[in-house]
Image (cartoon, rainbow, N blue to C red):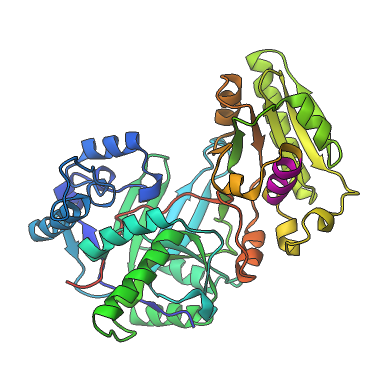
Amino acid sequence: MAIVCPFRAIRYDPEKVGGLEQVLTQPYDKITPSMQEQYFARSPYNLAYLIKGRPSENDSPEDNVYTRAAASFRQWIDQGIVIERPQPALYAYFQNFQIPEDPGGPPFLRKGFIGLGKLEDYSSGVVFRHEQTLSAPKADRLALLRATRAHFGQIFMLYSDPERAIDRLLDEVAAGTPQARVKDDYDTVHSLWDIEDSHQILAIQNLMRDQKLIIADGHHRYETALNFREECQAARPHSPAEGCCYAMMTFINMDSEGIVILPTHRLVSGVPEFGRTRFLSRAARYFTATEYSYSGADERGLVMQRLRADMSSAAREGLTVIGAIFQGWDAFYLLQLRKEMKRAEFLQDLSLPERSLDVIVLHRIAFGLCLGMDEVAVRKEKFLSYVRDFEEGTQSVLQGKAQACFFLNPVQIQQVREMALEGRLLPQKSTDFYPKLLSGLTIYRVEP
């Protein structure tokens, strides 16, 4: 049973911080060092000071990034920089955006709501994950949660509502004036409305009750919240209704039009005796290769667009295709898995949904069988790095920073659903749900 509850959100006072654009941030794991400096420069109250503080060489158990975050948070509450709502509520959260690599393309609207979700062990069959987590990020987030006893960003949860009953309720709320509206660094407009009506809250709770929830983004923070709950229970028994048994979540209907998953492309570097001819020769057993040659930067751009269009068209036809560019050659390549290939022969330990994933074919066949990378090398990123942007991957190869770049179509939401509900995990860096949820729109304090 999925339990969703209203809560008394803590929010910034826009008048005291000079506008929400000055203080809200991308999720902590998306904040690069350069972004961190930009955030710090915007305002002394920028959320980055709490969720991505700057360590010092003089840090100690008594004075460190976590204790400083807790002290700043308490000070901001005392000064009225952030204010807690007097009554619990849910919060309609809409995002208007365009895909970054298609600025002239159609606009998208993603609808969701923020609330507290009851923490459930994966074994309960209520919450499902789709990717593996790492110990270091969880240790970092747990230290911050211990010190501040607050959730500053939301876990992105997917649910299934083909009839869009909850979306219609959110539309009713969104007909009014938003409590907050802010444009982020990527031109996504984030809007927030309070859902205070008890009948609307109850209707949403009842519609969510039988849902199975899939974590889209925030696996590390979800498992951190589980660990924090266990620590609280060990210190003193807590009832299931107490604050540490919940985490702040944004719930979004996976059956709505606003779900966008972007691909993450693979850069290959440092592979011994790697070369285009050698790779294509080995790959010929598994793939047909089409060459997209070009001459000069202008033609390269046009050819790149043709490759991308052909990749998208192939995906719509249900074909498995992978794009590629190799160092030292003025050409892109389209690798299409041969129709006569029996996936079960090479992917026999995988389920049918796993065998359908382009990224699995890339890792297991192109990297494993053609380049000799084993799963440990892939998982530890011995020869791999990742880029979101097609042009960035191309330039990395052209500038000699990588031996090759392999381009992927995005994973489809139905594939994520099937994998997660089967208890299967996608390879790392398989999904990039866009846009990210803005951190700091609402803050959940576990207890005073």
Q: How many marks?
A: 0
Q: Nearer the viewer, residue 46 or 259?
A: 46
Q: Residue at x 25, y 71 (%)?
A: 446
Q: Position of residue 360 (x, y in %)?
A: 69, 51
145 drawn magenta: no
User: Can residue 95 be spotted in the picture?
Assistant: yes
> Vertical placement of 262 versus 194: above or below?
above
* Side (left or right) of 194 relative to 123: left
Q: Main secondary structure of the magenta part?
A: helix
* Side (left or right) of 61 relative to 294: left
- Residue extending farthest to the top is 296
> Vertical placement of 232 versus 80: above or below?
below
368 drawn magenta: yes
> Vertical placement of 276 versus 1: above or below?
above
User: Can residue 195 be spotted in the picture?
Assistant: no
* Side (left or right) of 296 relative to 64: right
Q: Nearer the viewer, residue 142 or 439?
A: 142
Q: Position of residue 77 (x, y in %)?
A: 13, 60
Q: Position of residue 324 (x, y in %)?
A: 70, 32
In the image, the segment drawn in magenta is: 360-369
Quarter in which the C terminus is drawn: bottom left
Q: Residue at x 42, y 57 (%)?
A: 135
Residue 247 sits in which quadrant? bottom left
- Residue extending farthest to the left is 79
Q: Residue at x 59, y 27 (%)?
A: 402
* Side (left or right) of 245 relative to 319: left
Q: Residue at x 34, y 77 (%)?
A: 245
Q: Nearer the viewer, residue 333 or 56?
A: 56
